[in-house]
Amino acid sequence: MATYSAEKSSSSDSQPHIAKGGDHSPAYVLDERRRAALAEIDNASFSWFHVKVCMVAGVGFFTDAYDIFAINIASTMLGYVYGHNQKLTSNQDLGIKVATPVGTLVGQLVFGWLADIVGRKRMYGFELMIIIVATFGQAVSASGHAIQIIGVLVVWRFIMGVGIGGDYPLSATISSEFSSTKIRGRVMAAVFAAQGWGNFAAALVGLIVVSAYKTPLLTEDVVTDLNHVDYMWRLLIGLGCVPGAIALYFRLTIPETPRFTMDIERNIQQASQDIDTVLTTGKYIDNPDAVVQRVEAPKASLKDFRRHFSQWKNMKVLIGTSYSWFALDIAFYGLGLNSSIILQAIGFGSPVTKGVQGVYQNLHNICVGNLILSAAGLIPGYWATFFLVDVWGRKPIQLMGFTMLTILFVIMGFGYDKLNETASAKKAFVFLYCLANFFQNFGPNTTTFIIPGEVFPTRYRSTAHGISAASGKLGAIVAQVGFARLVNIGGTNKFVKHILEIFAFFMLTGIFSTLLLPETKQKTLEELSNEDQEGFVHGVAAPVVVKDGVIVPEGSAL
């Protein structure tokens, strides 16, 4: 699609002129055509194209979650093979767990910005290539004279995190902009719910791999000879390439969203044609020799960005989406990347007291424990949001989730000692822990993904979503560093109860940040942008034709 324009760039930074009802100028006609095209998207019936968008975007989130949370199990395996006394040091464990959130933060900011500059379609798929290459790189990593394998893994996991970070704003924006108003929440929730299945798959693959190596593992002569565990973690992480490779073709061939074409490329004619074909066949026609009619409308720039977000009505929304995600990820990643430690802290995992038999039993129990947490808490929470997000609304679900999480973390934290005195009390702790996982996903973990994909103007939607998501990953980094530094104060895993109390405080603050957000249920993206849509198109540029990369006025001969 051609991206050239003949209008002066200075006009794009100006405020839109409101067209009068009796005005039939070209600008007025194009403005009406834009609104008619947007209405066609917003009122479209659910189709197989929407299913395709869910599947293509969802597979990426499945891969993301698998790759992120597989390290929860793999880090224990790495400790048996490369650690001192069969355990990674706190710095090594922190390094391989925090590298991905750091990379994710970078990817969310960079890809979010690029998607608003060069297009959603042009960037979609590149982030998946990064994930595939980095995941394979981890699986074949080895030590050398200059660097140990843990250092190599940290680098690869950072690179993988950059790709994962790109997936957040791209998938959220694409699924949001292609969806009709009445199903937008469920489409976005379905995409994000793939995370739960990725988490579950990581634990399931871990269990299968550990079970497959049970016999050779238990025939080892000495406890320090654990070569087969080296095969386990490589298979566990390396298999994360498979779903990404399957989805890559579909991501590279997905159409550009009509909203990007209309509001950022400012080509209403092409966007109208795309809507007619994309929503019915899922395909679009790209004619490089077509007449390109550009319109004058608000255009992304640093000046316009400052103008838009300097208004409190817009700034408070960005603060609300960013801090809510930050507070949520303090607990979500604090638990998610350390559930194996917490399971062992309450006596679920078996300590190594019986040689290699103990190694197998510990790994087996960690995998089973993560399966239970995923199946009993994570997955049901995602789908509860799916069924109710367009009925209850995003804001009530987020408020309810933060409230329930505050209560649960207070009980688990301040009642930690009592909940670990007997076997039945430990079962109660696991039940509360599963409830916390449930209300994270039937609550702010899903809604903090959905709301930033809805509440910002098209020209800043991906950028602002990336800023919000990056704030969440900052919370994940803070949580992981804090967990690693605090968990063993007073003895091994002795500080867990106080960490849970800290999580309760951040959940409480999340309630207040949610109050800054608007309810987005059953509202169009343009309504939520806080910009007047009447007269949004306030000028028209001379049509141009692009032939063989050369711009010529319409009707001219080369």
Image (cartoon, rainbow, N blue to C red):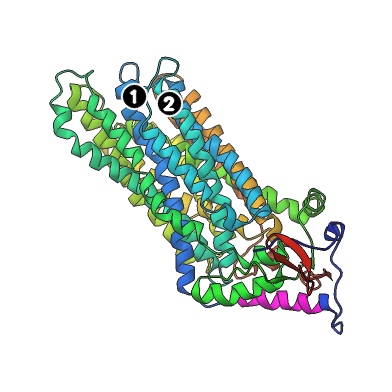
Per the image, the residue denoted by label 2 is 93
Q: Residue 315 at what x, y percent from top left?
A: 74, 51
Q: Which residues are magenta?
A: 28-43
Quadrant in which the N terminus is drawn: bottom right
Q: Is residue 7 left or right of residue 323?
A: right
Q: Secondary structure at mark 2?
A: helix
Count the numbered circles shown: 2
- Residue lying furthest front in this view? 558
- Asked if one can make out residue 348 in the rendered structure from this viewpoint, the answer is no
Q: Image quarter for residue 284?
A: bottom right
Q: Secondary structure at mark 1?
A: helix
Q: Residue 269 at what x, y percent from top left?
A: 69, 74
Q: Image quarter for residue 80?
A: top left
Residue 363 against residue 447 in the figure, above or below: above
Q: Are marks 1 and 2 in contact (CB under 8 Å)?
A: yes
Q: Residue at x 47, y 74 (%)?
A: 47
Q: Residue at x 69, y 59 (%)?
A: 549
Q: Is residue 153 left or right of residue 181?
A: left
Per the image, the residue denoted by label 1 is 79
* Labelled disc at residue 362: none
Q: Main secondary structure of the magenta part?
A: helix
